[in-house]
Amino acid sequence: MTKKELGAWGETAASNYLAGKGYEIKLRNLRLGNQEVDLVCVYQGKLIVVEVKTRLKGEGLAEEMFGRSKIRNLKIAAVKIRYLFPEFGRVGRFDLLALELDTIAKKLKIRHYKDVI
């Protein structure tokens, strides 16, 4: 599995996970110039921008890939989302979903961090 395929797989798994928790997925894989947002959701009336990081077991923590540059880009993207999709309202929260896939045991661990920025 290539990194791109793993990332796309992770976004689908994260989307399914959030939908199962009652989140309404509004947008997936949104490109806004130099910014990219994995998921834009609404949960309990609040607009949530979600970053998804996926790693294979043994490659380290997915959370380690969430750094200052990504945080800066998400903040810029939030302004653009508000401008392009005013019907969504203001971004209320930024979440991080860290996925760890164990291909041998065929298990997936999902860690959901709320309000990371």
Image (cartoon, rainbow, N blue to C red):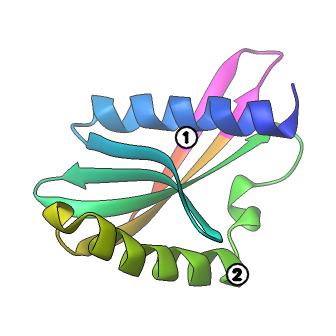
- Closer to the camera in the image, 18 or 38: 38
Residue 101 appears left or right of 86: right
Residue 50 in picture, x, y percent from top left: 45, 57
Residue at 49% x, 37% y is 14
Q: Mark 2 to mark 1: distance in Å? A: 23 Å
- Closer to the camera in the image, 46 or 73: 73
Residue 28's place in the image compared with 17, above or below, is below
Residue 109 in magenta? Answer: yes
Q: Which residues are magenta?
A: 100-110
Can you tell which mark lies on residue 64?
A: none
Q: Quadrant of residue 66?
A: bottom right
Residue under pointer 1: 110
Q: Classify 10 Å Cα crowding around label 2: few (below 14), some (14-19), many (20 and above).
A: few
Residue under pointer 2: 69
Q: Classify 10 Å Cα crowding around label 1: few (below 14), some (14-19), many (20 and above).
A: some
Residue at disc 1, secondary structure: strand
- Kindly identify the amino acid type of the residue bearing the numbered disc 2: Ser
- Closer to the camera in the image, 20 or 4: 4
Q: Residue furthest left?
A: 45
